[in-house]
Amino acid sequence: MAAPLPAIETFPALRAWQRKALVEYLRRRSEDFMAVATPGAGKTTFALRIAAELLVDRTVDAVTVVAPTEHLKKQWAQAAARVGIQLDAAFRNADVHSSADFHGAVVTYAQVGMAPQVHRRRTMTRRTLVILDEIHHAGDSRSWGDGVKSAFEPAVRRLMLTGTPFRSDDNPIPFVTYERGEDGLLRSRADSVYGYSEALRDGVVRPVLFLAYSGETRWRTNAGEELAARLGEPMTQDLIAQAWRTALDPAGDWMPQVLRAADARLTVLRNAGMPDAGGLVIASDQQAARAYAKLIEQVTGERAAVVLSDDAGASARIATFAASEQRWLVAVRMVSEGVDIPRLAVGVYATSASTPLYFAQAIGRFVRARRPGETASVFLPSVPHLLGLASEMEAARDHVLGKPKEREGFDDDLLERAQRDDQASGELEKRFAALSATAELDQVIFDGASFGTAAQAGTPEEEEYLGLPGLLTADQVALLLSKRQAEQLAAQRRRAAAKPAESARDAAAAPPAPMSAAQRRVALRRQLNALVAARHHRTGQPHGKIHAELRRLCGGPPSAQATIEQLEERIATVQTL
């Protein structure tokens, strides 16, 4: 007996972007449709509503969902069952056909790549809607892309979903439409786009505060020479990689100090209206994940849940954590895209992966809003590329074919090469040896702007930022950050004024000590933020839009990465607007 059709009237009310995209989809009635929506916006609900519409009006007889991971297969099946669409998450290629009890099946891209002919036969047997979740994964390998194309060419309808920036390689993605731009390059075209900035305005996602931590790092070369560098300072890529790897070393002081700060922030959120708020540490590998879990237990006195891989037990552990009030979950970075836990509100980005695609996937774990005013806080190393990605969180990216290749961030291969060879600083130790690392709150990034001056871990200055209220609108976040920065500067001035009068006279008589490059950048960032805030109050324009306009006029990266010269140019420009 065939599975009963879903009842459209029982579906939850759609959000504005979902209604608009649904109307556009039903108006077009085309074979292919691609929806790009920020993580947490509700792509699954949108896709299931389309599936229900097509099942009810007999456009299709079956639904196939293709997901990146085994865990997401279960999530899709559970979400579909809640709205009356029965999908077989246990389907295996050897089964050939789904049971009549189901409207269809959920499979992974890997399954399709291994046996595309099985899925092609299934698609040809019944009129099928194929939902390709996180479609960029179809470009992960030629076999996956070719398999998806071969398997689902006969489908009556194909719906592509993605919530992250597209790939930076030249692997074309099946069924995605590419259009040639004025520069001659082919770019992916979406039929519906709903970005983070729009979702933030609508209250669909949370405002995200990025707390960037710098600090002194030391490591030893194979010649026995010790090198030291300050995380976040301008360096060669190889030295940045070394300092970054040293900071993330569980045996150093940087990770315990950052975890202690992140747990303090989690406590603030729990006491401020999010009693079940949870934290996620994203680690690079299993060894680091286990070590971070031990650190969390030492810092908090409570064990952390650990998910090491996308295996049979991972889904159960994630589900248990999601339904509990346990404080912390530690996951190897490969699991992060499949972790969908709405109560996650604090993150620690303790991984070396930093491509725009991966960064967006990771931050997407924290942005899902459940009630008005909830905020998210992500702690990350003060690495220039990461700061740029944090500042450009709202940027939309298309998949571009034929663009000259530029490395986007670091990856494990680069970090491993940096351990073996360093052209700028001589031969570094082939077997990496981190010696020490300390943490210091460098800046807070929100809405493209940078706030705060350096604050040592564990000091009242750091606590002022960790103690920001947990329930705030985006405007309130920007206002409070500006206020905290002003208070921090006023306290510094009071401390300077409290010195003995004799020291003050000596200081007045002596010429002012020259500022270091780091001090000048902090002062210029502070001046730029004050001028942007003043323009915001005059015009009502969001801070992020003003910063974006300054970048358009002056060029260069976000202010968190900008050079002294670039900051000075923007200050001069904003004063003329």
Image (cartoon, helix red, strand yellow):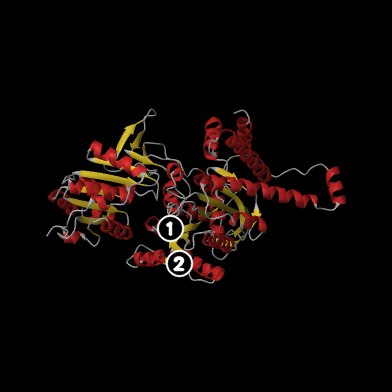
Q: Position of residue 161 (x, y in %)?
A: 32, 46
Looking at the rendered image, the quarter that the C terminus falls into is top right
- Please state which amino acid type lies under the numbered disc 2: Glu
> Label 1 belongs to which residue?
333
Whether residue 172 is visible: no
Q: Secondary structure at mark 1?
A: helix
Compared with residue 405, is residue 41 higher up or lower down, i.e. above or below? below
Which numbered disc, 1 or 2, marks the residue that appears first in the sequence? 2
| Nearest the eye: 410 or 124 | 124
Picture quarter containing residue 527?
top right
Q: Position of residue 146 (x, y in %)?
A: 25, 47
> Label 2 belongs to which residue?
325
| Nearest the eye: 248 or 38 | 38
Callout in the foreground (1, 2): 2
Compared with residue 190, is residue 252 higher up or lower down, i.e. above or below? below
| Nearest the eye: 88 or 123 | 88
Whether residue 100 is visible: yes
Q: In the drawing, what numbered circle is on residue 100? A: none
**How far apart, in angstroms, are the residues tagged by discs 1 and 2?**
22 Å
Q: Position of residue 45 (x, y in %)?
A: 31, 50
- Please state which amino acid type lies under the numbered disc 1: Arg
Q: Residues within 10 Å of mark 1 (few under 14, many from 20)?
A: many
At 35% from the left and 36% from the top, the residue drawn is 187
Q: Secondary structure at mark 2?
A: loop
Q: Residues within 10 Å of mark 2 (few under 14, many from 20)?
A: few
Residue ranking furthest to the front: 9
